[in-house]
Image: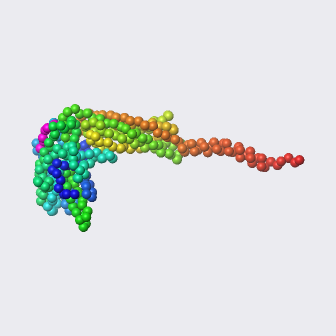
Amino acid sequence: MSTHHRPSSRRAPSRARAAAAAVLATAAVAVAALVLPAPAAAHAATDDLTWSLAPKDGAQGAGRANFAYDVEPGEQVRDVLVVTNRSAAPLELSVYGTDAVTTPSGHLDLLPADQEPADLGSWLALDAGDDGTVTIEPGESADVPFALRVPDEATPGDHAGGVVTSLRQQVGDGALSVDRRLALRVHARVGGALAPGLAVSDVDVVVHPNANPVGAARATVTYTLANTGNARVVPTETVRLTGPGASAVAGGEPADELLPGAVVRRTVQVDGVRPTFRVAADVRADGLVVGVGGGGATTATGTAAGWAVPWALLGVVVLVVAAAVGWPLWRSRRTREVVPSPAR
C-alpha cells in the first residue's frame, strides 16, 4: 500500500466521557490504529521516532480533547491540527481523515487505511501538501489546517471520524510493511431532529451445571445490542433471570459508546441462578446520549427463556430412589438364598 493517502480520510476512536489525558496506540502489520481519548496531546512512539497531536487553540476553543462541532447541512468549519515531532530525527507523516466505527465487540475504531470513508471522513479536507504528507524537523511542530465541509444532504444527528497521522516503515528485508498511526477524533452533530434509539434482539440464555446438588449455578446471557437512532449513546445494561421462586440480577461490563448504526454482541454472566428447570432472561439496556449538547436517553428491552435443569440434584434423587427400590429387592433375594428348603 502507498504511504500517501487522500486528504479526505481520517481515523480516531476515543471514549466520549474521558477527561484525563490518555493515549491509545496500536501498531499492526499493514494497518495500525491509535486512539486518543485525552484532553491534552496524543503521543505515538515508533522505536526512536515519537510524535504527538493536539487541536490548536483558537476560535474553536482552547485545551480541547478532540474536535467536536455543532453544524448545519451545507456549513463549513475550519480548524487546525498541531503535529509535534518529539524525536531527534526528521519525521515525514501522511495526514488524512477517515470514518470512526464501532467494532462488533463494542470498541471504537477507525476504518482501515485502505478503505475509503463514506461519512464524516469524506467531509474532511486537510491541507497537507499535494502528496498528503507533512515533514517536521526534530523538536518542531507543524500546523495542519483542515476544513470540515458538511454536505447539503447530511442527515441530522451524530457523525464521527478522525484525523490520522501515519508513519509507514519497512521491516527486516523490506518484505514487511508496518503502518503506525496516531489520530484525534472528530465529532459533528448535524442540526435537525435528534432521535436516540436502541434495540435488543437475539437473546440467548445458557445455565451451566453445578456439581453441588443444592448450590446456585451460573448463567451466560448473550444478546445483540444495536444503536438504531442517530445519536451517540453509552449503554448501561441489566440482566435479570427469574424462575419458580428465585431470581438473580447482574449488570454488563462497562461498554464504549455506540455510534449510530452500530451493532454489537454482548455477553453477561449471572451468578446465583437457581436451577428450577426453566428460567426467563430479561435484558434492559439504557442508553445515555453523549456528544455535543447531550440529548437525553433511550431504553430497549429483550427477553428469552432457557432450561435450567438441576442435574446434580436429579442425580442424587435417582441414586436415592434406586437405593430405596433396590435394597429391599436385594434383601429379599439374599433371604431366599440363605433359608434352606424344607426336607421332603
How many badges with numbers are in the image? Answer: 0
Identity of the residue drawn at 44% across and 41% down: 205
**Is 28 placed left or right of 218 in the picture?**
left
| Residue 307 counted in the magenta span | no
Question: Looking at the picture, does residue 339 appear above or below residue 226?
Answer: below
What is the x, y in percent for residue 154? 19, 38
Region rendered in magenta: 73-78
Identity of the residue drawn at 38% across and 35% down: 302
Residue 271 appears in the figure: no
Identity of the residue drawn at 21% across and 37% down: 155
What is the x, y in percent for residue 293? 21, 36
Judged from this view, the residue extending furthest toward the bottom is: 173
What is the x, y in percent for residue 45? 22, 58
- Location of the N terminus by quadrant is bottom left
Front position in the image: 263 or 335: 263
What is the x, y in percent for residue 103? 30, 47
The picture quadrant where one finds residue 170 is bottom left
Residue 266 appears in the figure: yes
Question: Looking at the picture, does residue 293 appear above or below residue 25?
Answer: above
| Residue 76 counted in the magenta span | yes
Question: Looking at the picture, does residue 213 appear above or below residue 28?
Answer: above
